[in-house]
């Protein structure tokens, strides 16, 4: 929360608490995805980059597709104007989220070959670039996990050099993750995204 909002809460507590109560109840009839898309639009309207990145991440996590995000921005054109939509698009391009790349917008999820199971490191992280996406793996005994390299906070692509021991730390806001479990161990509260995977003819395949 900003210093200005904290000030208003202290200066006019009754009015501000009533306002926040109203906000919490005003979306009772909207589904989660619609609320998230509206939140994305509001952050673009006021050009708050951190808020845009955060709410974009939440919208994607709650099931909004990249096409829905783009459609929401374009539908809000009369209010936002072209300059703000271009501003948001420039941030999207900088984030380089694989799902937003033009060739992937209408792609159907499929199995991707990561490599030979025998070549996947044991009890240490593996790092891969597969079909334009970075992945981490962790193999212990018969258990294998395949993680997206993107931080669940603001979709920052975490480089393999950010790994120290079993701890993977996002360089942007220092969210830290246990690479064995995928759980967030510092700063944040959401785990790394795991991809469904299978072993077929000695090859590791991941689904996205």
Image: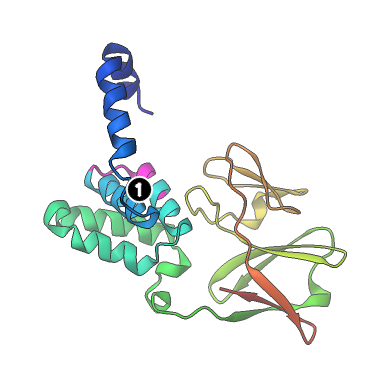
- For image coordinates 59% across by 36% down, the residue present is 187
Q: Nearer the viewer, residue 37 or 104?
A: 37
Residue 130 drawn at (x, y percent): 60, 74
Q: Is residue 15 magenta?
A: no
Q: Main secondary structure of the magenta part?
A: helix
Above or below, 39 relative to 101: above
Residue that protrudes farthest toward the bottom in the picture: 201
Residue 127 drawn at (x, y percent): 69, 64
Magenta-highlighted residues: 46-53
Query: Residue 97: which quarter of the image?
Result: bottom left
Above or below, 81 relative to 184: below
What crowding class fits label 1: few (fewer than 14 Cα within 10 Å), some (14-19), or many (20 or more)? many
Q: Quadrant of the C terminus?
A: bottom right
Residue that protrudes farthest toward the left in the picture: 78
Q: Quadrant of the N terminus?
A: top left
Q: Is 60 situated left or right of 43 in this image?
A: right
- For image coordinates 14% across by 55% down, the residue present is 81
Q: For numbered disc 1, what is the local secondary structure?
A: helix
């Amino acid at each position: 929360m900003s210093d200005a909002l904290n000030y208003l809460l202290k200066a006019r507590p009754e009015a501000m608490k009533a306002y926040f109560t109203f906000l919490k109840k005003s979306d009772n009839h909207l589904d989660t995805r619609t609320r998230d898309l509206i939140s994305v639009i509001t952050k673009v309207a006021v050009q708050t980059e951190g808020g845009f990145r955060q709410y974009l991440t939440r919208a994607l996590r709650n099931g909004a597709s990249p096409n829905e995000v783009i459609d929401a921005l374009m539908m809000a054109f009369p209010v936002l104007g072209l300059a703000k939509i271009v501003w948001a698009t420039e941030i999207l391009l900088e984030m380089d989220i694989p799902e937003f790349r033009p060739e992937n917008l209408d792609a159907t999820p499929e199995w991707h070959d990561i490599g030979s199971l025998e070549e996947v490191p044991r009890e240490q992280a593996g790092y891969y670039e597969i079909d334009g996406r970075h992945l981490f793996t962790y193999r212990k005994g018969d258990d294998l996990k395949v993680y997206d390299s993107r931080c669940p906070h603001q979709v920052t692509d975490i480089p393999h050099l950010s790994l120290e021991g079993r701890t993977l730390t996002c360089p942007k806001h220092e969210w830290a993750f246990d690479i064995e479990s995928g759980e967030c161990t510092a700063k944040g509260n959401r785990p790394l995204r795991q991809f469904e995977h299978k072993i077929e003819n000695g090859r590791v395949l991941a689904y996205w």
